[in-house]
Image (cartoon, rainbow, N blue to C red):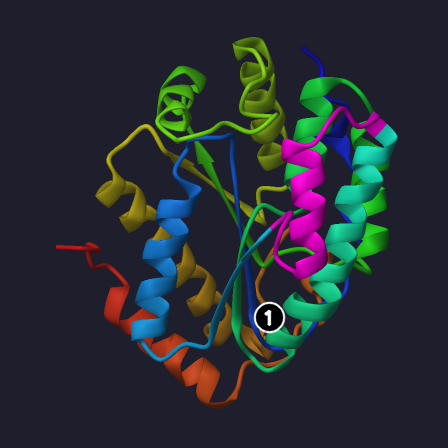
Amino acid sequence: MTHEHRDLPLAPGSQAGPGLFLSFEGGDGVGKTTQIHRLSGLLEAAGVDCLVTREPGGTELGAEIRRLLLHGGEVSARAEALLYAADRAHHVQTRVRPALARGGVVITDRYLDSSVAYQGAARSLGSQEVRDLSLWATQGLLPDLTILLDAEPGIAARRAGERAALDRLEREPSSFHVALREEFLALAAAEPGRFVVIDADRGVEEVAEQVTAAVVRLIRSRTESPGGHVPQADASHSQVPHPTGGAWAALSAFAATYGGREVGR
């Protein structure tokens, strides 16, 4: 299977402020909600200003779009892509950028990589045009770190099946979820400076340790590197403001507490 986004040019995105922007990606049933809850709990306990949100559905408008896309009738491919982009534009403008501007940590359950991966798996639209649409909608904002929870589709499907009701995408055949996993892994391979891939087939505690370790590395790279920016292959963070103030004091304390330490033990 070929992936047209393997050689995507890196986007010239714009950083919204001194905060940290984290996204969790992966197929359905990989454990994103569980890991986001655990990570945000640790950050908040350390006194970090933390916003947990999701796409679609992170705003009142987004909740309506989510209902239409996941629980409504059939939506054409282009209309679907535009609805996701509309949700993302409003979400970033009204929630994500304000939180980053005040130095907070934003953790989102899905972001633009989900749009690219799901459209790629469905083979309905080109990955490049879906990516470009999202970058236009968000004025080029990319996460500082994208955590891809990767699990065998069969295991993830069993986990997702334990929920009370499945949405339209969760009901797709197994071949779709196999293709979706390949799309996510291809995106991670194309942007290794932004992505961290974690084996989500492992136990919850072990996955949590790896998630926390990845965030600690990000915090340390931001606070210890010259000029305060995170060294990445992605040019979107080349002008990151120097981390200062109480928010970063709390993050530094978090990194000192959990750096090299097993989580939940």
Front position in the image: 212 or 102: 102
Q: Amino acid at mark 1?
A: His
Q: In x, y percent, where is residue 261?
A: 20, 59
Residue 74 lies in quadrant: top right
Q: Residue furthest bottom?
A: 245
| Residue sitting at x 68%, y 63% | 237
Is residue 88 left or right of 174 when viewed as pictured? right
Asked if residue 20 is among those painted magenta in the image, a careful observer would answer: no
Asked if residue 57 is among those painted magenta in the image, a careful observer would answer: yes
| Residue sitting at x 31%, y 76% | 46
**Mark 1 residue element:** loop
Front position in the image: 214 or 223: 214
Indicate whether 149 appears above or below 88: above
Quarter of the image with the N terminus is: top right
Residue 171 lies in quadrant: top right
| Residue sitting at x 56%, y 79% | 103
Quarter of the image with the C terminus is: bottom left
Front position in the image: 34 or 229: 34
Q: In x, y percent, where is residue 257?
A: 25, 71
Q: In x, y percent, where is residue 143?
A: 62, 56
Part of the protein shown in magenta: 55-77
Q: Is residue 9 visible?
A: no
Q: Is residue 38 visible?
A: yes
Front position in the image: 22 or 186: 22
Is residue 125 left or right of 24 when viewed as pictured? right
For disc 1, the marked residue is: 229
Q: Residues within 10 Å of mark 1 (few under 14, many from 20)?
A: many
Q: In x, y percent, where is residue 255?
A: 33, 69
| Residue sitting at x 51%, y 35% | 26
